[in-house]
Image: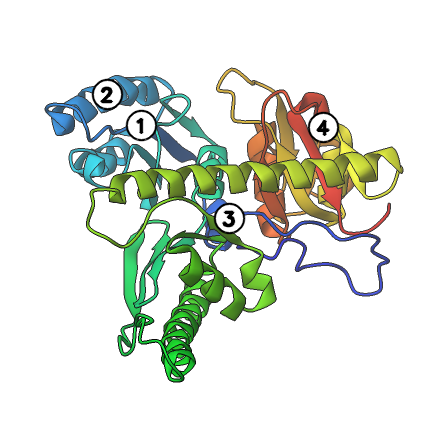
Amino acid sequence: MAAAGSGQNVGMERSGVTPQVAADTSDLADLVNASGPFLSLQLGTEADIDNAAQRSEQRWRAVREQAAAQGAPEEVLAAVDPIVPDAHLEGQGLAVVATTAGVLHVEHGPRLPDTEGARWAPLPSLIPVIGWRQTSPAYVTVLVDREGADLTAYRRERPAVQREAGGDDYPLRKPNAGGWSQRRYEERAENTWDRNASDAADQVVRLARRVDARLVVAAGDQRALTLFQEALPADLAQRVHVVSGGRSADGSEDLFREQARVAVELAVNADTDDLMEKFREERGQGDRAAEGTRAALSALAMGAVDVLLLAPDDPADARTAWFGPDATQVATTAADLRGLGVDEPVEGRLVDVAVRAALGTGAGIRVVEAGAGLEGGIGAILRWST
């Protein structure tokens, strides 16, 4: 995940610790600095319906007309055409950013977009993409028994990574031999379990670090689970979520995957709750918080934002702000920017201007619920007290 606030100014006092839960948006920073205007597309691409490709193309035709009516050139729309037919093979939603220079970004989301549509505007609209990313953190699943474990690491828009751990199977069970040798047999079996659990833990540590896993979802034999968790380093053990299931081929894999999906969703919601709790704490102290359009833009102009908080994108939100060539050149009026030496301020949608400034200053971005209580649907946790 992105290290929100990595651009903190040296020498500035910072109070408290901000939960580091912002999605990785480092690849989007160059995108917002490209020369516009931009076509921003969000399209549903359902895979589990008949004639999925044709249905996606039908949707695109309607949205294409909408974009053309806004002034999007035919060459830009034509560049998107070949992307649509097979998009359902990659995800439930499609996001594209394009300019007259060509397609700049393609992303496939894990769920349908909240709204479908296209926008031809001075800046790309990236809140839907950021929302998808924060609901799809990397995670690792573990099915463990006393013989070993099956491990899978999941990450956004990349193939899953699968591993097997353990496999030491002698002795695997405690024989009921009786007599003076009984304890020796039991210790040998327990040593086998320990070795398999330690190997599973080592493999999980490697996988979790490789994909920067938000959590580990584990299931299996209770004794093996206990040994596995005890063998993990403390920081990773805190991210383990245990559900029901096991390694046996009993048809429970679908249930395990569903439980893993729910665990990921709960973790994402908990991260947002933690961030909003921190925001409310800082706001209540009159410390590291900014709320509302003017305060948030002022903080972005100072490079003071640690995490930008935004409500979900609302296509009907027509509020605008002004921006200049540099990321910190943002204001509510063109006159304010001219006063700062920007000769030709450009007007854009407020949320898109805010996102561009956040990306350009290394701030994290979190999309929160519409009813989260943010004035104007925009706020920020700051890097230092202002």
Q: CA distance from mark 2 to mark 3?
A: 29 Å
Q: CA distance from mark 2 to mark 4?
A: 34 Å
Classify mark 3: residues with Cα within 10 Å, few (<14), some (14-19) or many (20+). some
Q: Earlier in the sequence, mark 3 or mark 4?
A: 3
Q: Which residue is mark 2?
A: 59
Q: Is residue 277 above or below residue 188?
A: above
Would residue 366 be found to the left or right of residue 293 on screen?
A: left
The kind of residue on which mark 3 rests is Asn
Q: Which residue is mark 3?
A: 33
Q: Measuring 42% from the left and 23% from the top, which residue is drawn there?
A: 114
Q: Nearer the viewer, mark 2 or mark 3?
A: 2
Q: Measuring 87% from the left and 42% from the top, which residue is drawn there?
A: 287
Classify mark 2: residues with Cα within 10 Å, few (<14), some (14-19) or many (20+). some
x then y, percent, for residue 104: 35, 46
x then y, percent, for residue 79: 23, 38
Q: Residue at the front extreme?
A: 179
Q: Nearer the viewer, mark 3 or mark 4?
A: 4
Q: Earlier in the sequence, mark 1 or mark 4?
A: 1
Q: Are marks 1 and 2 in contact (CB under 8 Å)?
A: yes
